[in-house]
Image (cartoon, rainbow, N blue to C red):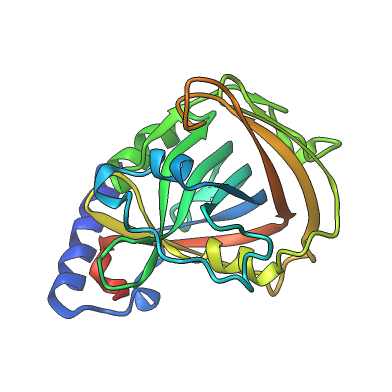
Amino acid sequence: MLWRFAASLALIRIVQASLVDPSTLPVAIVGTYNVTFAIAYVPNDLAKSLLPASYQNSVLPANATMFPGLQPGQTPLLLELGREANAGPPGLNMLSFQEAKIEVPLVDRTGNGVPFLYKRIIFVDNYVDVIGSWLEYSLNTTFATFNPANSSQAPSFDYTIQGVISSIFSTATHSVPLETFKYLAHLPWFGDGLLCAQHTYNWEDAPSPVKIEGSATLLPPYSGGSGGTTITLYAVQPVVSFQIRGPFPCSAWT
């Protein structure tokens, strides 16, 4: 773990010195993601409640073509409900674990109109990942209990994190384009630290994602109030390989 931290510091110095294109930097993490990428249109106040105070007025306008049906006063929210397999640094990618994320996209992290994805909270069932996510990426990551315990082998797309969220899905033909999910998944992202990173996904070699639709109940403190909030989810379910580059200064994307 310490050598990974030292390597990250070296990359940060390179980027600070030369503003290297992030796509040319070495890959930090690889793996395969069996995941439901789910978009919900939520009231602006709920989205703001998930953001740090300094970014609550920094959400960029959403494109109506990318987010059909989004109403005035609403912000898109992104949930990732899945399982990573063979994840870790290249050559040491041996971890498999349940992982779910609650995220706010389109955040103007650097103040110059470039959209970022804010990772509000990450839930995993592996303590190594809890520690590594915080040390390397300053991500608010916590251990949780999942049902199913292994979503890659589950007979349905339903997904529950005990005490946090309960979701139910069925196949659907909703109108959110696949390109919208790809766009959000590839946004550079940040957590509670000063640095950023980015996922890239190999959609070309993956099976065609399944379109699904459903609903979920968010529980406090992620519901925007003192009680549970039910949201509609428009989703795709791919199994796709990924790479993570970073962390390094967020200015690398500007």
Give 102 or 48, whichever is nearer the viewer.
Answer: 48
Task: Say which residue appears at 59% left-offset and 46% top-offset.
Answer: 80
Task: State the image coordinates of residue 14 (x, y, percent, origin top left).
Answer: 18, 71
Task: State the image coordinates of residue 65 (x, y, percent, origin top left).
Answer: 64, 74
- Residue 74 lies left or right of residue 136; in this view the side is right
Give 121 or 105, whichever is nearer the viewer.
Answer: 105
Asked whether residue 117 is in view, the answer is: yes
Q: Is residue 138 above or below residue 123?
A: below
Quarter location, residue 148: top right
Q: Is residue 12 above or below residue 83?
A: below
Please tell me how many numbered marks the rendered image carries. 0
Task: State the image coordinates of residue 140 (x, y, percent, origin top left).
Answer: 37, 36
Task: Say which residue appears at 27% left-offset and 43% top-offset.
Answer: 53
Task: State the image coordinates of residue 85 (x, y, percent, origin top left).
Answer: 62, 46
Q: Is residue 52 above or below residue 111?
A: above
Give 202 or 73, whichever is nearer the viewer.
Answer: 73
Task: Say which residue appears at 46% left-offset and 58% top-offset.
Answer: 90
Asked whether residue 246 is in view, the answer is: no
Task: Say which residue appears at 26% left-offset and 79% top-offset.
Answer: 20
Quarter location, residue 69: bottom right
Question: In which quadrant is the C terminus drawn?
Answer: bottom left
Question: In which quadrant is the N terminus drawn?
Answer: top left
